[in-house]
Image (spheres, coloured by chain):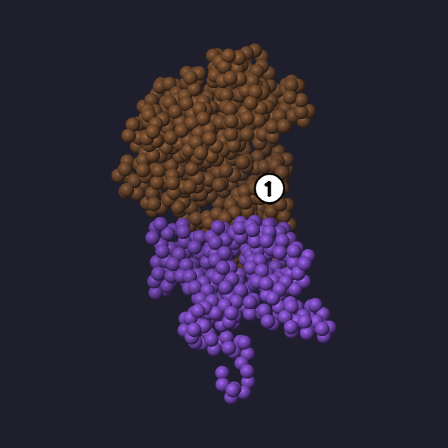
Chain colours: A purple, B brown
Amino acid sequence: MSAAASKPESLWAIAWHQLRRNRLAMICLGILTAYIIIWFYAEGVFWRGRILDKTPTYKVAHYEIRNLPPSAHHWLGTNYAGKDNLLLVAQGTRIAFEIGLLTSFIVIPLGFVLGALAGYFGRKTDTVITYLFSVIGSVPDILLIIGIAYVIHGVVDRSTAMQALTRYVDSGLLSVCIAMGFTGWVGLCRLIRGEYIKHRDRQYVLAARALGVGHLGIMFRHIAPNVLHIVIINFSLRFPGLILTEVVLSFLGVGIANEPSWGAIINDAKQRLWLGNWWELAGATAAMFFLVLALNLFGDALRDALDPKLRTADTKSA
Amino acid sequence: MLSVRLLTKITAAGSILLLALSGCDRKQENTDSTLYLIGGDFKGFDPVDSGDTESAEEVCRVYEGLLEYSYLERPYKVTPRLAEALPEISEDGLTYTFRLRKGIRFTDDPCFPGGKGREVTATDFVYSFKRMLDPRRQSDGDWIFIHHVLGARGWAEKGEFDAPLPGFVAVDDYTLQIKLAKPYPQLRWVLTMSYAFVVPREAVELYKKKFREHPVGTGPFRLKSWRQRYRIEYERNPSFSGQRYPDKGMPGDREAGLLDDAGKPLPIVERIVLYDVSEYYTFWQMFLGGQIGASALNKDYFEKAVTPQLGLSDDLKRRGVRLYKTPEPSTWYIGFNMKDTVVGGNNPKLRQAFACAINVPKLCEVIYNNRYTPANSLIPPGIAGHTEKPYAYTYNPERAKRLIAQAGYPGGRDKNGNPLRLTMIMPGAGSTDVRQMGEFFADHLRALGVELVAQQLSFAEYLRREHDGNYQVMYAGWIGDYPDAENFLNLFYSPNKCPGVNATNYQNPEFDKLYERIAIMTDSPERTALYEQMVDMVMADCPWALMTYPLTYGLYQPWFQNYKRHPFSYASSKYHKVLPH
């Protein structure tokens, strides 16, 4: 960097430059943008139906055109009820993003706060939290998620408050998100705990302490900005995992029931796959494949850019 | 009557009930006299605990009762089995006297002195019936006796096993009397059920909790070995007493070769080997490979085997495979909880609107590949009381709209202008078919402005909710236990309300009066007329929106003989024959 530079670049600006130079990451970002546009479109369709109280097109069954192969009218053919597969796959994108975001709303605060508490205070707090996440982490994820999802399903069915909520959010989606939220925070919690252990004795922290800043202030105003990139990296790498888990759950019939998630589409498709109806499966699988691939590659690039210590060999030598 | 059996069948709705395999266990000899079968998981060989189809089928191989169904004759007919003849019934219809066949022996077993099976006497029946009613056994079959047999309820409440039960009398070794508190013309049907089979007291007392693994019966086969969830082997019971293949059948049976073995001693096969396989794909491959003799068809494989015209595909025809198609004595419906503040009560318009909004022929096509037919009466075909009268609430969206407006929900809106929201419980968590069906119903109701939330529940949860009456709308089916409309009409008799079998909590004093009349009448045109009147009464109130009657489609191999499906009898394997192939 030349001495003439008038203003030092921030971490984010450096990361962005780094990313700009990575062509693969930019392609992935383009793909992600396309998905986000589809997501917004699907949300628009969904909420328009809700607000105007009209049945959205993707939900209208046309029994006279069941199981049609792809054509100019229906690019991905139609399903068992004559609904257009392309529209369903687009709605599946909405579900995938909703799942990722809703679950992250649970995972990030939970993982971050618990990790911060454990790492910062150490001792007994650390022991308790470590014990908690070790126990949760030791149970195979999918089993635990299915178990919790069933319990939450039951709770949603019985409580009137939850029933009111399900007017706006699908009850299956709600239970899957809560279930994944309560199992998914372990990884983030571990990372944040490690970072806090590293930071808690650094000089800037000692200085803050000497100036009389309280524990909460140190944890969330001083240390947090220095570990926030971990959350972003973790989020971008976890996102595809959440989507895949939802697909598996819906395929197994535990997940979303009344909205077209990719898992449910694949579940429907398997019934006719042996008849040669490949298009139902292909649409949802391809949509999932490209989103997960793009997210993974972009997440890796983002990690390299944001966390220089983890940078892979070729970027170091560059 | 209900549910255990019903629910197993619900589970089986998309899968399979019975598969017979033959011949390809290369290690075995005598392949032509061994019947290979595939079965599901079952509970064990205890007649008092045989309410599900899988258990009933295994119990029927080793145990027997006083009466059984005629294998070939239709309409379904009861014939004597361990009784010498059909019972003598007293004038007032309250005393049934059975003369037992002499020389019937339990199979040899260490529980008897010297290991030699002893003769069955009337006392054994009294013991077995009491054992079934014993509250400690918690049999789900106690309904077959408890309401009708003299003193049965009092005895069960008292809980002393050896106290006499006045309704069951062993007059002498070969004479058994059943005394009733009120006439019970259905007794002959329920006595064919596995709940009423005879077991020896010695075996129950020796094996105690292990009795379910040590059957000691009079049936055509006896258990040779059982490895749970893997394999069961039966061999011919040497002390099985001289039953012969029937020589009377229906027109067409002779041509179908069903009478070729008339007069031959039963059972025809020497051995039965049954494997527990639960993956349909495996069955299908075994069937194509010629290992399985017969196979019911599930939805996924239906289109592979059957043409759109509902004939057999050319490939299977070339193999000589034959297709069978039998109506099942059951009705599937959408039930409304009459105690619910929205769908229940005296205003049937909303329920009628619901019924009119659903395109049942389309349901049959989309979800069932036309394997099911639209229902038009509570009582399915083949059972007295069924009429061909068209259903009063066939699909008619315009009428549905009018009806729902009359019900006080114009355009499907409630008083606050919100869409009416109904919740329907469905059995089968995780089942694709059930989810698609839920979507199907929701799509149709949306056209009416109503929002239907379909909840897929596990069987246990569904059963509990149904049993407790804790639901608004349910998707359900009823499978007849015996070929009498009374078995369907008791679902609307108000003393049977939840937790009884009247799961919709339907209440109509006039209907109750008629029910009390028909329940004690024997078969007559007058009773059939009353049945029709009662059906009309229920239809007008519409606690059920009728959906479908199932048809079972299945395939059997040319070398698998004497196969005729009987929806009420589980004791068919003694008639089956396997040709060398």
Above or below: residue A23 compared with residue B331: below
Q: How many marks?
A: 1
Closer to the camera, B543 or B136? B136
On the question of residue A14 being in view, the answer is yes
Q: Which residue is tagged 1?
A: B464
Task: Answer with left or right where residue A277 lies relative to residue B12.
Answer: left
**A47 versus A150 height, above or below:** below
Crowdedness near tag 1: few (<14), some (14–19) or many (≥20) residues, C-alpha within 10 Å: few
- Most foreground residue, B121 or A298: A298
Q: Is residue B382 among the parts visible in the rendering?
A: no
Q: Secondary structure at mark 1?
A: helix
The spot of residue B317 in percent (x, y) is: 28, 39
Name the quadrant of the N terminus of chain B.
Answer: top right
Chain letter behind tag 1: B
* Residue B50 on image: x %, y %: 52, 30
| Residue B443 locus on image (x, y percent) | 49, 56
| Quadrant, the C terminus of chain B | top left
Q: Is residue B484 left or right of residue B261?
A: right
